[in-house]
Amino acid sequence: MVASYHSAVRRTDALESALQKMDSSTTDAARCCEQLTRRARQLDSLTSPASDASSMLSRANANLAATLVLMKDAREKFDTVTDCEPAIERLYRGVTDMEEKRQYAGKGRKTTLKNRVVLTEQDVYAAGDSMEILRDAFDYFIERKGWRSAPAALGGLERVHRMGNETMSMLMISHLKGAGPAVRPKRNVKKDANTVSPMEETAQQVRACSGVYFLDMIVNRLSNPIIRTIALHRLVLG
């Protein structure tokens, strides 16, 4: 009986000791969980700014790429005068040489020009394309008048485009002079009650009577490839 009592007491003491150990382990585990929670909060406070910074860097990278494209386009527009002026200057030199040669030939003398520029149809095409590029660049800078360098760029574009326009006109006039006069022939009309003398004709009547001859004249002039090229470019450029 006594032995059973002592055995029960030992079991009770062992159970109480085990419960104390469990309580101590639970306390340590709770303390570790609290530490983990604090460290997780610290890690979150460190990673959140890093995520925000990464997002900002991504947006900045996209903005820089878009800015680079705009700067490249603007640089090309600023270089328009430098790129297009040589073609127009070549056409201008060719036209002036052609006109001077025509003047010398009309006076019965030989020209003394050296290194004379001989124009081809490709030169006219190149000058016409350059004028279209100048027009596009002009529209580009008109939309960006607020830029500090926009007025200077617009002035250069106007200067080169004006020179090209005048050169095209000079070339057209030179070829038309060489093609001969375009005079409205004398018309033989039957006199009747509705006949109007040439001195009393209105502008509409003259235009109606001369339309066929004018179209024939234009077709004859456009048989020249250079005149045809100039006319097409003038129609495109307005």
Image (cartoon, grey):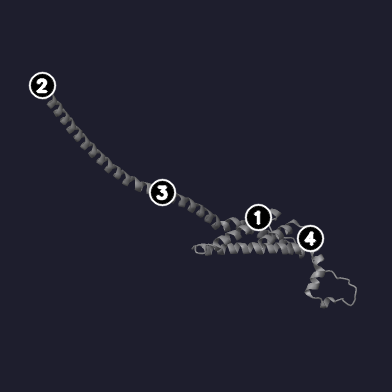
Q: Residues within 10 Å of mark 3 (few under 14, many from 20)?
A: few
**Residue kind at label 4, given as amino acid type:** Val
Distance CA(mark 1)–CA(mark 3): 48 Å
* Mark 3 or 2: the one toward you: 2
Residue linked to disc 3? 55
- Callout 1 touching callout 2 (CB < 8 Å): no
Is residue 204 among what the camera can see?
yes
Residue linked to disc 4? 219
Q: Residue furthest left?
A: 2
**Residue kind at label 3, given as amino acid type:** Ser
Distance CA(mark 3)–CA(mark 2): 76 Å
Q: As displayed, is residue 64 above or below residue 3?
A: below
Closer to the N terminus: mark 1 or mark 4? 1
Numbered disc 3: secondary structure: helix
Q: Nearer the viewer, residue 78 or 106?
A: 78
| Percent of width and height locating residue 194 | 87, 76
Numbered disc 4: secondary structure: helix
As drawn, is 49 to the left or to the right of 137? Answer: left
Distance CA(mark 2)–CA(mark 4): 139 Å
* Mark 1 or 4: the one toward you: 4
Q: Nearer the viewer, residue 216 or 53?
A: 53
Closer to the N terminus: mark 3 or mark 2? 2
Numbered disc 2: secondary structure: helix
Closer to the N terminus: mark 2 or mark 4? 2
As drawn, is 44 to the left or to the right of 223? Answer: left
Q: Name the residue located 63 percent from the left edge and 58 percent from the top edge.
A: 132
Which mark, residue 176?
none
Which mark, residue 126?
1
